[in-house]
Structure formats: structure tokens, C-alpha cells
Amino acid sequence: MLKRYLIASGLAIFSVMPLHADVLSIAEPTYNTPNSESGVMRPTRGMTMQQVEQKFGVAEQQYAPKGTPAITRWQYSRFDVYFENQLVIHSVVHREPTP
């Protein structure tokens, strides 16, 4: 009996309460920055941390690994590199400031 009362009370509360949702506007990412001399040279998937450091130098900032599997981010002046354990999984070019 108490269980039915609690369920009915819960349904009544939710039917009276107005529903609210936030709308987030996120600019559409662009993926047209080439990984070439004419674009921004950056690490490619599968490179090791050692290979990235040899080719691109020491990162300006290295963030501690988080989660399982460990995801690490290295920040360079024009791009960020994301590693899963010791291997590159993605590199992201920094967005140019809009005027």
C-alpha cells in the first residue's frame, strides 16, 4: 500500500513540475586543416610518445594521465596531442581566434 502511494505521489509531482532543458550551442568543428607543410604538421595516430618528442620537441605543457585506459594530453603551440597509454590516438589543431 505504501509503495503504491509513493509511486502515485512521485508521478503526481513530476506531472505538475514544468520540464526544463538547456540548449547548448557548439560551433561546428572543422577538420579541413591539412597535416602537411601547407597546413599544420602534427603527430599521427599510432606514433609513440618518444617519436612525437623526437619529431616535434618537448611539449609546452604535459598533463597527467587520467582514466582507464590512461589518456594523456600534451600541449604544443599550434596543436594538442592525445595519447592512450603511450600511443597517439588524436591530434587537434588549435582554433584560430576569430576577429
Image: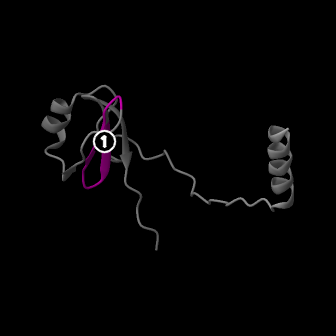
For mark 1, give the secondary structure: strand
- Which image quadrant for residue 47? top left
Does residue 77 appear to the left or right of 9 in the view shown? Answer: left
Q: Residue at x 46, y 69 (%)?
A: 98
- Which image quadrant for residue 58? top left
Q: Residues within 10 Å of mark 1 (few under 14, many from 20)?
A: many
Residue kind at label 1, given as amino acid type: Val
- Quadrant of the snapshot with the N terminus: top right
Does residue 22 appear to the left or right of 65 in the view shown? Answer: right
**Most foreground residue, 5 or 62:** 5
**Most foreground residue, 22 or 47:** 22
How far from the left and from the top, in percent, is residue 68? Answer: 36, 30
Q: Residue at x 32, y 39 (%)?
A: 66
Residue on which disc 1 sits: 81
Q: Residue at x 78, y 59 (%)?
A: 19
Judged by its main secondary structure, the magenta piece is strand
- Give the residue at the far front of this rendering: 1
How far from the left and from the top, in percent, is residue 95? Answer: 41, 57
Magenta span of residues: 68-82
